[in-house]
């Protein structure tokens, strides 16, 4: 049996015409994206950011985000319906507030680590055991440590604490000798 018997020629022509009238897939995808952008409001936010850049106001990300939140809040008259959105705004503000100091401390951490590495190079190789030295190197460079490395680091920490106690006594003896 052929399918031609089931479909008339007129209905198949209408189907072909409809296919030609349909918007191409690429254009349809583009229209969907534009509609999504309008719903989300990205275009509105981009315009605000462009206006702020034109004003040449140098602000932190947190401050600009705070202004956007204030503008959004001022437009609302009935906040009870927007509780979910308010929670999201506040969570995002809190996260931005937390991340800003962390970024500053990361740069400070890098400077401290480089100073420690340079100071560590001054220690003679024979001063520490080989395994302790390997564990300290791994800790300095942020490499993954094994359980034995952690053991040697704890051992070194105990040795250092004992030696620091001894240093106090040596300082007293030095004062006496002077």
Image (cartoon, rainbow, N blue to C red):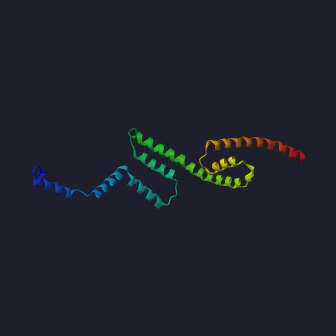
On the image, the x and y values in percent for residue 178 come to 89, 48
- View extreme (right): residue: 177
As drawn, 36 above or below 166: below
Counting the numbered discs, the total is 0
Q: Position of residue 138 (x, y in %)?
A: 63, 49
Measured from the top left, where is residue 143 in percent x and y? Answer: 60, 49
Quarter occupied by residue 33: bottom left
Q: On the rendered structure, is 139 left or right of 158?
A: left
Q: Is residue 55 above or below residue 101?
A: below
Q: Specify the quadrant of the image occupied by residue 161.
A: top right
Q: Residue furthest top?
A: 80
128 relative to 75 in the view: left or right: right
Left or right of 66? Residue 178 is: right
Q: Residue at x 10, y 54 (%)?
A: 10
Residue 121 pos. (x, y %):
70, 55
In-front residue for pair 152/50: 152
Q: Nearer the viewer, residue 27 or 136?
A: 136
Q: Residue at x 9, y 50 (%)?
A: 5
């Amino acid at each position: 049996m052929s399918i031609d018997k089931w479909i008339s020629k007129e209905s198949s022509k209408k189907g072909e015409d409809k296919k030609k009238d349909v918007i191409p897939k690429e254009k349809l995808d583009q229209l969907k994206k534009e509609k999504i952008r309008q719903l989300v409001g990205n275009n509105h936010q981009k315009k605000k950011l462009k206006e702020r850049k034109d004003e040449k106001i140098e602000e932190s990300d947190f401050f600009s985000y705070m202004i956007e939140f204030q503008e959004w809040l001022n437009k609302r008259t009935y906040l009870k319906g927007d509780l979910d959105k308010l929670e999201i705004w506040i969570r995002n503000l809190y996260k931005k507030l937390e991340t800003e100091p962390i970024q500053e401390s990361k740069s400070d951490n890098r400077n401290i680590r480089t100073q420690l590495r340079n100071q560590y190079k001054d220690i003679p190789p024979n001063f520490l055991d080989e395994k302790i030295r390997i564990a300290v190197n791994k800790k300095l460079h942020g490499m993954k440590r094994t359980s034995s490395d952690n053991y040697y680091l704890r051992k070194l920490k105990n040795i250092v604490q004992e030696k620091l106690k001894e240093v106090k006594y040596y300082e007293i003896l030095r004062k006496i000798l002077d």
